[in-house]
Image: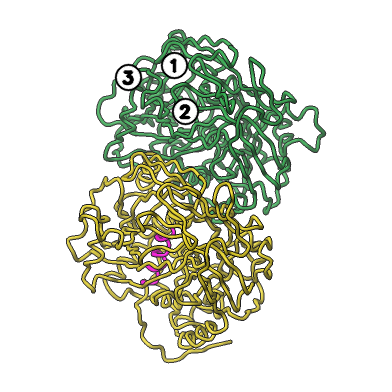
Chain colours: A green, B yellow
Amino acid sequence: MTEATTRLARRPRTTATPLRVAASAHARDGGLTAHTDFHDWYAEAGKRAFTRVERVPLDDLTGWETDPDTGNLRHHSGGFFTVEGLDVRMPAGPVPAWSQPIINQPEVGVLGILVKEFDGILHCLMQAKVEPGNAGGVQISPTVQATRSNYTGVHGGRPVPYLGRFRDPGPRGPLVDVRQSEQGSAFHHKRNRNMVVEADGEVEVHEGFRWLTLGQLHRLLAEDDLVNMDARTVLSCLPFTHAELARELGPPADAFRAALLRSCDPSAESRHPLGAVLSWITEARTRTEVRARRVPLAGLRGWHRTPERISHDTGAFFDVIGVRVQAGGREVAHWAQPMVEPHGTGVVAFLTRSVDGVLHVLMNARVEAGYMDVAELAPTVQCTPASYEHLPASARPRFLDAVEQAAPERVRFESVLSEEGGRFHHARNRYLIVDTTADAGPDVPPDDPEYRWMTVHQLVELLRHSHYLNIQARSLVACLQSLLMPAEPAPTAERKVRT
Amino acid sequence: MTEATTRLARRPRTTATPLRVAASAHARDGGLTAHTDFHDWYAEAGKRAFTRVERVPLDDLTGWETDPDTGNLRHHSGGFFTVEGLDVRMPAGPVPAWSQPIINQPEVGVLGILVKEFDGILHCLMQAKVEPGNAGGVQISPTVQATRSNYTGVHGGRPVPYLGRFRDPGPRGPLVDVRQSEQGSAFHHKRNRNMVVEADGEVEVHEGFRWLTLGQLHRLLAEDDLVNMDARTVLSCLPFTHAELARELGPPADAFRAALLRSCDPSAESRHPLGAVLSWITEARTRTEVRARRVPLAGLRGWHRTPERISHDTGAFFDVIGVRVQAGGREVAHWAQPMVEPHGTGVVAFLTRSVDGVLHVLMNARVEAGYMDVAELAPTVQCTPASYEHLPASARPRFLDAVEQAAPERVRFESVLSEEGGRFHHARNRYLIVDTTADAGPDVPPDDPEYRWMTVHQLVELLRHSHYLNIQARSLVACLQSLLMPAEPAPTAERKVRT
């Protein structure tokens, strides 16, 4: 245990949550689980928990059927989700009308991380969990990922461990409790309840679970395909803005981190006051008229179904495929399901810039057909570059060049991360944070209808509420938080590990 | 002009908005329009702007038709709104399933108040406007009430004055800009953009408009049927929390006002921190499963249509009626439309209570079928008492007795106010604020699933965001704000009125 963590052990529990978050972020070498031991445990967990995924025709999905009238894919039980069609009208958009398959899963599930202090440092109870769509097998997941189907037992599996702690968080209440959206390009109005609950009393650690510090999770975010999407969204909702973060984190290592730290101070000056940001969001949500209507999947304009898949006539966007799954180390051993398989690896990036010494992030008011409320704040860039290869340069997404052509030293964060492996098959995005402070910087007029420079404390303030930051932006907020500490801290003289 | 307002005239424009709001609230005797002159002007406006409303059969509504397949009522143009059926399933509710007519008006309109400083005091440009459903003729309305139909000209009327100021609020942006919901019992997902914009440059004052101070509007709120619903919701969104309100308002006149003033200080201790309140709202919105589906109005279970009206078989709730309107002083002179006519005057009340010297308001997480997002924060009591007269005492709404049986000196606010007269015919509610500080007080456990005591600054913070406070609660927030100053200020020695 480092000197800082020993000092923290004596702090009373009344400390502000952001400072406790910072202290845990500081513990990058781990606590109960030494970081040097993590990969051994992770490799072992990967052996016990595995899936074998085999593609099967959509008509051969055991438990699933194609509705004879609508062509929609649905489970016999009525549970889980359905694959339907969506007819979208966006009169003022670049594409004023289109149709697409969409996953309809109207129930709100729970994504929960249980936390507890050990030696005064918050630890997160994380699970090494496998999902059929994961590119690399097991990934670090929240304590609980439960759909309503899960906890009402529609799937006939075992009860979800630790779920009771989130159903009844105790008198102190949760540290985080907010419903947030998921991919609006694939899901119709899907959202999950993101929760962080501090455990009272003893917590039994089941097989496949480990207590990790936030500092460890931050290091793991930099590794490809390791921290899953559900873990990232919950981590992003942890409040980490406070005027005195440096007290826990120590002085910033460089100018970028100094600007990031200042941006986490709620009193730091923002380019646009929060009221102006909210007005910009109101304008985006009012200006854009989106009419999305669920329609039959059969005969969806522009799409065709073969025995193996439902694809767009141009081959673009994504396919709906069928898979049969054999799983070990999970609650049920065999199942089949439809999945969404995107085409190509995406790019999801924040451009950042220091304005008067305060880091700002360039946010995009993005409309997706499946959102609850028209538009959400998305990263500066969110696209699949392969889709634009054969199109003229004018069709390229704004700021994609600034990301792809950034000098290596400007790239403060880069890793390839998976989207949710329970619904997506090998959906991977390259997540980047590119700082433009030293460059001429991107040209964004202050009244640009689609983009605004925002401080980190503004993003964190909006994360208390539902449906402001989209799922990709939330992943990047977690990644941005991971940059508060240098990638490799100075080695510490001594470490105390308890088990 | 009072001494206070003269002092304020010299203050630079950089003053925080809540302090400018407070200074205008202080000017209860008026500014450009002396309050003693108000009623003359208002009476005169009432003569020029009138409606004659005549009930007509639903099949005789010029411009409207009954869809032959669905029985829905719709305008020939496709504009305005439709009256459809709604099938509601709320498995865990007291009534697990019902059907009802609902007004479907998916477009987001604008409710805007233009403000401008005269002699350093903010004034609101208010309109004496008549709506066919108003109980008492003209009412004080926002500068602009514009549906999308209005400003795209579907109704063929004149352009809406001042609308351009809200389309392009200028470089400083609006002071208020947030979409808020309307009655979820009558509207499907209806919301309007509530805006307050500060005018740059000269403003021509059209006939029927007057510059009024907030203090004047606060006095008018206490008069029956005078300030309309749209004005109340926009006023409620004006930020009025600040640690130094007393600097503008003077020392509070009594213990209730002292507690109210403290409750407006964002640093005042709340019974439940905002995070806990947000978690409670998340829980209410997740726990309650509501499935509301638009269905044909024809054959709606439990409802029947006669030539004159669509009514519930029991005679309860509301009717859909048809009216023919002849109007003077409005953009079009004749039209017909369906309206919703509720049965009986409602009661809408805040119970308040001082907790450690800070006023708290008892809020109810209320589910209504037409809300965008399951539940919103409603007043302590919101009901139509007549509906419960023939039911056992156990069916009575919680806290209704505490409101109806309150000693007169506990009733800090009471007036009968109309709901929106463009859709509702004579929909009137008795709005009350009842302080329980001196009594035993209502019994509300701290983990009550339906009620929470909240401070005023928490309510104001949530009003920056959409869909937290329902329309009735917003009206009462405006009324609560009106209580910061005593009902009758000491007469001032001198008044300066400019015209």
Question: Residue A443: percent from the left, percent from the top?
Answer: 73, 46
Front-lying residue, A284 or B264: A284
Q: Amino acid at mark 1?
A: Phe
In this image, B432 relative to B36: left or right? left
Front residue (pair B495, B145): B145
Q: Please tell me whether mark 1 sits on a helix, a strand or a loop.
A: helix
Q: Earlier in the sequence, mark 1 or mark 2?
A: 1
Name the residue tied to disc 3: A205
Do tag 1 and tag 3 residues touch (Cβ < 8 Å)? no
In this rendering, position of residue A158 left or right of residue A473: left
Q: Nearer the viewer, residue A365 or B49?
A: B49
The residue type indicated by label 3 comes to Val
Location of mark 2 (residue): A231
Q: Is residue B32 above or below residue B366?
A: below
Write the start and end of the magenta stretch as one range.
B471-483
Q: Amino acid at mark 2?
A: Ala
Percent position of residue A193, x then y: 43, 36
Q: In the rendered image, which residue does mark 1 sit on? A: A38
Outermost residue on the front side: it is B307
Instruction: Name the image quarter holding the C terminus of chain A.
Output: top left
